[in-house]
Every structure is written in C-alpha cells, then in structure tokens.
Amino acid sequence: MFNVVIVGHVDHGKSTLIGRLLYDSGSVPEEKLKEIREVSDSLGREVEFSYLVDALEEERKGEMTIETTRTFFKSRKRDYSIIDAPGHLEFLKNMITGASQADASILIVDVAKGVEEQTKRHAYLLRLLGMEKVVVAINKMDLVGNDQRRFEEVKDDISSYLRTVGLNPLFVIPISAYLGDNVIGRSESMRWYKGPTLVEALDSMPERAGYPYFRMPVQDVYLVRGERVYVGNVISGRVRKGDEVHVTGSGKSARVEKIIVLDGELEEARAPKGIGISLDPDPMIGRGSILWNGKGLKGVKTIESTVFCTEELKSGEELEFSCSVQEAGCKVEVFERIDPISLKRRESEVLGANEIGRIGIRLDKEVFVESFKELPELGRFVLRRKGMIVGGGIIR
Amino acid sequence: MDLAHLESLEAGSIYIIREAYYKYRDRLAALVSWGKDSTTMLYLIREAFFGEVPIPVVHIDTSFKLKPIYSFRDRLVKEWNLKLIVAKNEEALKRGMNPSMGRFKCCTALKTEALKQAIAKYGFKALFVAIRRDEHAIRAKERVVSPRDSEFRWSITDQPPELWDQFNELDEEGKHVRIHPMLGWREIDIWEFIKLKGIPVNPLYFAKKWPDGKWRRYRSLGCEPCTVPIESEAKTIDEIIEELRSTKVPERAGRAQDKEMSYMMQKLRSLGYM
C-alpha cells in the first residue's frame, strides 16, 4: 500500500482529482455513483466527482473540503491510499494530519490561477514534514485551451519556489482532473507533453527503504507468566534470540532470552513487528528506553528545529515533548517566525496558530534520535500541551 | 495476498493498542459487535497481550441483533476468556423502542444512549472501536484517537491534529476518547488476515440458500430489522476474498443507517454513534 496525499490551494481541484482517480480506475461502486448523481441534482449542480470524498453536509453545501479523508484505488502496479487534504488556511491542522501519513505527495496548481498562498504554504509544510517524493500536477489545462506556454510559465513559477525551500519535484505534469487528461489515461489534446501521466509518475516511485539496524522503542513492561517482558514494535532491522542488545540511556547491554508473540516464541523478528522481549540479565528499564544494536543512536538534550504549530507558542513556555515513545518535559524558545509565502524571516518570541518558525527546545532529560531521512520514527517529534498535540517537526 | 502489507497493518494496530493501554489502563474498554472487524480487533488485542484480553469487552445490545450474533458472542467469551459487559438501554426497550419508531431515533436510543449509560456506570475514559476508513465516507475522516465531549459529540469539522504515530491524550472530566486501531484496514485486508491467522468468524458471513432458492450472505452485521443480506454464493473465506476483488457494491449496502442522501451517518456520528 502506497499512501499519497494531495495538497494545494483551495479550489485548485484536489477533491475532483481524487474523484477522477477513483472513477477512472473503476473503484467507485455503482450505488455510490447513483447517490452522487442524486445529491448533485438536488443541489442543482452537474455531477460532482468531489462528492466522492467530500461527504460532509457542510462540505457539499459549502463546496469545499474541511476534513482530511482517505480513499483507495488500484493502479496496474500497486494499491494506493489517497489522502485528500483541505486547502483552506483554517483547516491547516487537517492538512498536516493527512500529509504526515503519506509516503508521497501531489501538489496541485490551477494553471489559470497559478501559484497561490496555500500552494506555497502546503509546499513549505511538506518540506517541514520531511516529504521528499513530490509530484506537481498543473490542473485545469482544459480552461487554458491546453496551452503549453501557460503550462511552462506556471511550471517555472512553482519549480523556483520549491527549489528555494529545498524541495525537488520528481515530475511536473499538465492535467485536467475534470476531463481525466493525463491522470490515468494519456491526453489526446496535449500531444506536446511527453512525460508520464500522473499515475505513471506515482507508479515509478520506490517504496521506503528499510534502515538496517535493530531498533525497538519500549512501549511498556508486562508481566507474562511471571516474567518481565518488554513490549514494543521492531521499527527497523531484525533481532534474534541470543543477540546482544543495548539499552539507550543506561549503558546497559543484555542477551535476548526470548522473543514472545501470541502463539509462543520466535527465533527472529523483523520490522515491522509488535513483539515482547525478555532479557538476561534483566536491565530493569521502562517505557521510553530503546533496545538497539549496530550503529549507536544520538543522545540529545537540546533540539533546534523549524516547526509549525497549530496553537500559539511562546518563548519560555513549558510543554511536553514526544519522539516515538520517548517522553520528556521541555522549555521552548522561539527564535524567528517564517512566512512561507514571502519566505521572510522575522525575529519573534511568539508563534501564532498555523504559523511556522525556528525554535529551540530544551529537554529535561536526554532523548535518543536519528535523522528523519534515515529512520523517520526516531527523527520526528511533537510538542503537546496537556497531552494535546500543538506542533511538531523533524530532525534533519 | 500481500503479506508485507498485512504485517504492517498488524504491527500498526498492536502499537496503537499498547499505547492506549499504557495511557488509560483500567479506564479502557473494547466496544465490540461480534462482526468480523470487532473479532479481528479482539484477536489483535490478544496478540498485543500474548493471549490475554486485560480490558472489559462491551457489547451494546439493542436486543434486535441477528440471532447467530448472540451464540457467536457466547462462544468467543468462553474461548478467549473475555470480561463481557452487556450494555442495554432497558428503559427505552421498556418503552417499546424499535426501528418502526424511526431508524434514527432507534439507533440513537438503543446504541448511542446505551453506550452513554455504560460509560457513566463504569467510568471508561477510552474505548477501542473497530471502525475502518473504507467503510464509509464519514468514517474516512476519523482520527485514530478521536475525542468526544460529555454529550458524546464528535466535532468533525474541528478535530485536533494527529501526527505520524503520535496520538492526542485527553484527560478531561466528562470527556472520553474513541480509539480506532483498525482505521487503516480495508475490508479485504480483514478477510485476508482472518484467513492467515485462522480467526473465528460469525457463520452469517457465509452464503446459504434461502427459501426462494437464491444464495445470500451477510456482508456487514447489524440489527435484524435494519440489515439485509447480499446475493452471493461465497461459502468460504477464499470465495469471499474472491468476491471482494471484483465487487462494485459497497460493504454497508445492506445497512439502513448508512445512506448518505440525508447525511444520516454524519448526524448519528456527531451525536456519538460508532
């Protein structure tokens, strides 16, 4: 399963594109199409593909996506889960929620309107979330008579912005989601375009490569038939019975005595797998330690990073920090605010809701991290206030 | 069968289940209907705890459920040693509540209200629910951890952000969270996993010959008056998987409360329905 998020400015056609992907790939049940036709009729509109994802009453009547959603389709190569992200600024936390679950992304730009505010903001956030696989779809080509020159203009515009923020789009594709041109099928009206269709571009993207070293963040300690068992998911590499593993933060090492699952014991476990491990000698650790071998992890007590926040953040504030199952208290210091539209940086001690900025995080205990690129699970973090997520970022 | 895909779903669900247990311990329960999704969720809970189900299992019993659901329930409770809590809105049933008084009214009274009563009685702060995104366009918009206020309302247009594998924790008086460990599973994933692991399933899912000579099976299980079987000749798990690969009929086509025409699912869910 390959997860793709569709982002971009409001009304540039995200939901319509998803509707088109579902329809052209034959993923829409007959009954559903009938419902969509009837609802479109009752609102006095043409058949609206976006209703396939915009299921909320508020979304259909207001003609906009509010909440991120998920649909599935199958290409000739593999199964896809498509995440629709809302384009309005006020629903940014929903866009981030959707994008954080994606392996790749489609940034959609209306060819007539060109690059707009949320196009840039979304692109910036993709970069901030560590997204590297980005395809740009220049949409509504039918509205400009499939004009190649206009396509090239918008392509140059968006490409130059993306380059400035450090994103490198794999493809820039002229499409019409409304007519289905260059989505799954190749367009007859844009013969000047020689690159892949949107789905061909998606199909060409490789799955995420695994990290070779064993890592298992300890979620909890259970007593199983009188024995202390450390439970958690193997997030990378593999572990075998008898292996020597190390424990972050303690300097301790131990031998893997048993690997436990529902049906009994395993000789070996590979990522991704939820297991239990008993160790000899028992290091007497708890939640938040990471069992590992191979290359060591980096212990940090301060982190400097570009973050986005969904609620206001002030210098000096004490918040909770989580990276995988590692939890710590922290104090944040806001350095500067970054405007993703103009890319201007301004010194600031406060970040408002939906803003992006550079901050320092001082942790009240050491946590162990990897770069996001190598092992995303240990290269990303969130900030919480009373348990609720208010922001996040990655470790480069 | 894409084994790597199933293993990744399985590991993801076990992770969510263990996170929830760490945060909520004895204030956590599993809400189950004894359909294929809840049964798979119970199996995943057993995997997370090495054969044990350490939390109560709550069955919202409208008393109108298809008969074989009850016998299947009793069998699983025994085999898996489950701590069963049956939640019924006795007062509404005494008043004679039934689907002929209006489906919306009936679902709200016998499901949502019954759940409210159970939460008040046992003080649960978190509930596992086996809903999936591909079941319904409204459920597709859910979070893994989804807060509900004291009135059980789901503010679907104002949900908190949820990032990667980090979930919100809510500990406020009167509120609770729904936790959805199976949100990313598809119907076909469930069946392939059931096959892979040999998980018991309710016999209602397998096709039988009806008195009119046609073969039918239930694709989604609910209350007898509001659930209809689909025409199908799939008599085994393999045949069900085969059927799902080619069908164009939605999974919950036989469920009356799902019709999107009147946004009934959205209205039910915003009031606290599962």
Image: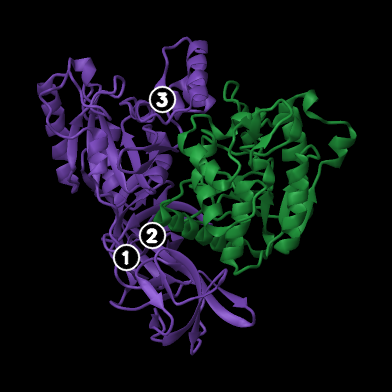
Chain colours: A purple, B green
**Under tag 1, what secondary structure?**
strand
Q: Say left or right for A170 vs A271.
A: left
Q: Earlier in the sequence, mark 1 or mark 3?
A: 3
Image quarter in which the C terminus of chain A is found:
bottom left
Q: Residues within 10 Å of mark 2 (few under 14, many from 20)?
A: many
The image shows residue B160 at horizontal and vertical percentages of 50, 45
Mark in front: 3 vs 2: 3
The residue that mark 2 highlights is: A381
Indicate which disc, 3 or 2, sits on the residue closer to the N terminus: 3
Which residue lies under the disc numbered 1? A303
What residue is disc 3 on?
A: A50
Callout 3 amino acid: Ser
Whether pointer 1 and pointer 3 mark residues with C-beta atoms closer than 8 Å, the reply is no
> Is label 2 in a helix, a strand or a loop?
strand
Q: Gap between marks 1 and 2, in whole Å?
A: 10 Å
Asked if residue A108 lies left or right of residue B64, the reply is left
Element marked by disc 3: helix
Percent from the top left, x then y, of residue A123? 26, 41
Of the two numbered discs 1 and 3 in the rendering, the one whose residue sits closer to the viewer:
3
**In the rendered view, does B124 fall on the left or right side of A24?**
right
Amino acid type of the residue that numbered disc 2 sits on in the rendered structure? Phe
Mark-to-mark CA distance, 3 and 2: 33 Å
Vertical arrangement, residue B11 with respect to residue A41, above or below: below
Q: Can residue A101 be spotted in the picture? A: yes
